[in-house]
Image (cartoon, rainbow, N blue to C red):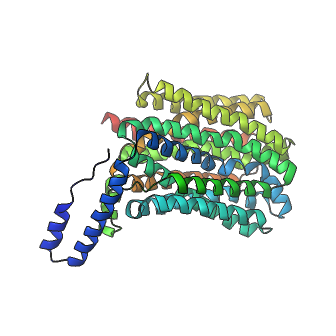
Amino acid sequence: MIQLPPKEYIKKIIIMNNQPELLNQASHDIKLENSIGSRLAKLTNKRIQLITWTLLLLVPIIGMAVDLIAPSLPAISSNLYSSASVVQNAVSLYLIGYGLGNFISGIFTDACGRRKLLLGGLFGFALASFIAAATSHIVVLLVVRFIQGLMLGTLSVAIRAILSDILPAEKLIALGILMGMMWGLGPIIGPVIGGYLQADFGWPAGFYFFSIIGGVGFIAAFIIIPETHVNINPLRLSILRQNFSEILANHQFIALSILMGLTYSLLITFHTAGPFLIQNIFHYSAIRFGHIALYLGILFLLATFICRYLLTKLSAKTLLLIGTNAALLIAILALAGNHFLSNNIILITVISGIMFFACGFIFPLSMGQGMSLFRHISGTATAIMYMINTLITSTMAALISLVHMHSGTPLICSYLFLTFISAVVYWKLIHWTRAA
């Protein structure tokens, strides 16, 4: 049962300060919370499981937002008469929108509730996807990709906040791993679906696909998901300033968010540069790229399963230590191997697969720990978490778009850079602060 905290003291404080207008607002908030709390208290375990799995089934949409479109990037470049560097901005602009969507909706979800943002994100994503499929102008497509990011950022925050509302704290870290698994379905099925859609119907088909699944998700969420936000936090600057100060002062939280951004950038690097490297330099088809990305996605998902199992045997601290340092060592070995096997697609596929595995191991573990630190202001906390994460990944995507992928060497160097910085973040910001 979900219980409401006592709030009669709010009325007393307001009355003492002669602010009847705030008293009226507080009374309205208390009535609303009592109403929502009463409905949540009636939720059975079976209904909570239905809500949880409905939300988890929406997560792969977020995971495939980049991967499904990636096989079509060279075709978009050709059909819309744009350079590769311009078209690759479809990735970075999406990520910027995703970060802003997380940040803005994370603030509003603690003040306005979860359900409206969840439904608005799904509807807006479906509509934006339809517009992208119908356009013939690269500028419109790039703007729509930014809007897609905003909508999925909103969806992402609403999902995490609802799960924080209905599940106890001890389940959230394990759920973070499960969310990573569901997200991992996107990189697995997205490139394959995108490759075949591109080969059979052309690049707009991927966006039509997004529009359809967004609409189906909206209908399912409308029927199943109730409002779950009980403790209303009015959108006041003083409260926001207090919440931001509390979160930003937590070095563990900031470090985990940075680590999420760096490891996720391993995937974004491949999906930004990989389509042009594999299709234009190595001269393979979009379907072949989709199959390669499928294998990498399976490795990502496998890593989340292994991490979930090892979490029952070892501490999260030990697993992060192993993951960050092993990834750096392998990236160093890959650069050495590239000296002898230059432009070898097998080497590129293997090292990319290991980087995907590292991301699947480190990313959900960091997310689960971060989510568990600020359950009382989960919306604002996840907003900051994913804003940091997405600022890092969008910056990396923008930088990669400026690099001419004439061979596999720039890609491997990018992996080495990201794993080195991840190891530094772990030793300087996570391991050190925990020891202190």
Relative horizontal placement of residue 237, taking residue 222 as reference (left or right): left
Above or below, 192 relative to 217: above
The residue under the point 73% across, 53% down is 209
Relative horizontal placement of residue 122, taking residue 28 as reference (left or right): right
Relative horizontal placement of residue 260, taking residue 32 as reference (left or right): right
The residue under the point 53% across, 47% down is 55
The residue under the point 82% across, 50% down is 198
Q: Is residue 335 in sight in this rendering?
A: no
Asked whether 361 or 197 is in front, the reply is: 197
Q: Is residue 189 in sight in this rendering?
A: yes
Q: Position of residue 255 (x, y in %)?
A: 43, 44
Above or below, 170 relative to 78: above
Above or below, 262 relative to 142: above
The residue under the point 79% across, 41% down is 289
Q: Position of residue 312 (x, y in %)?
A: 44, 24
Relative horizontal placement of residue 7, taking residue 172 as reference (left or right): left
Above or below, 128 relative to 312: below
Q: Position of residue 301 (x, y in %)?
A: 61, 34
Asked whether 239 or 319 is in front, the reply is: 239
**Residue with the most extreme top position:** 313
Q: Quadrant of residue 413?
A: top right
Q: Quadrant of residue 233?
A: bottom left
Location of the N terminus by quadrant is: top left
